[in-house]
Amino acid sequence: MILYLHGFRSGPQSWKARSLAARMAELGLGDRLWCEQLPVSARATMALAEAAIAASPRPPTLVGSSLGGYYATYLAEKHGLRAVVVNPAVLAPLSLSAYLGPQTHLYTGETFDFTPAHIDELRALDVPALSHPEHFWLLAETGDEVLDYRHAVARYAGCRQTVLDGGDHSFTRWDAYLDPILRFAGLIP
């Protein structure tokens, strides 16, 4: 099972989520993907993800993009799970402070107010140090225009890392890593 956690203002309609879902369906693994619209509240997101983890017949692998990478790190540490973090927001409370106020979901068009209380909820999920770096795989592109990839390289030191020159925050080489991610998750040989 893979739990895909999307980024801030994103959703299951994102290119990465749809591409992963299509590849898993192609391999007959469509029922092994959990990818929901995550609430704005980190607390509500954790409740949703925790329920999915509890319902999974086997320990799932987390795949998190941007803010989803921050969430995946917290959940992987808490539950001893494996996680692929893609251009992760390692300083989410700090980097998302610039987005306080009215926001719009990129795919649903829904508007919401991002508040200091949301930042506090994110701060509560901070993981000071990784206790099992072998559980993590960092995928990052140096051309990320939203987050400084060097923060992720430092944060996930000792973990498996794939850092590619160029690209952008969307992780432009995503499709080339779908099968390797499925292998990391133990879903294909």
Image (spheres, helix red, strand yellow):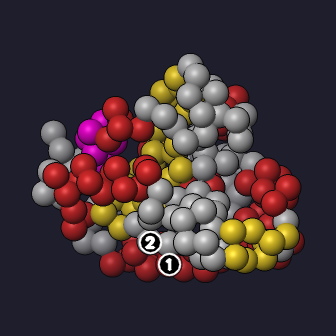
Q: Tell me the distance, in whole angstroms, between the alpha carbons under discs 1 and 2.
A: 9 Å
Q: Is residue 166 left or right of residue 23?
A: right
- The residue indicated by pointer 2 is 36
Q: Look at the picture and state if 154 lies above or below 123.
A: above
Counting from the top left corner in percent of width and height, residue 63 is at: 44, 52
* Magenta part of the chain: 179-185
Q: Of callouts 1 and 2, which one flags the residue occurring earlier in the amino acid sequence?
A: 2
Considering depth in this image, is 131 or 26 the residue closer to the camera?
Answer: 26
Quadrant showing the C terminus: top left
Q: Residue at point 70% right, 29% down?
A: 150
For the view shown, which residue lies furthest in the left direction? 28
Q: Residue at point 36% right, 67% down?
A: 34
Is residue 169 covered in magenta? no
Q: Are marks 1 and 2 in contact (CB under 8 Å)?
A: yes
Q: Secondary structure at mark 2?
A: loop
User: Mark 1: which amino acid?
Assistant: Leu
Counting from the top left corner in percent of width and height, residue 146 is at: 71, 41
Few, some or many C-alpha atoms within 10 Å of disc 2 (few <14, some 14-19, many ≥20)? some
Predominant secondary structure in magenta?
Answer: helix
Considering depth in this image, is 57 or 48 the residue closer to the camera?
Answer: 48
For the view shown, which residue lies furthest in the front direction? 109
User: Mark 2: which amino acid?
Assistant: Glu
Q: Is residue 57 left or right of residue 171?
A: left
Q: Look at the picture and state if 60 lies above or below 156.
A: below
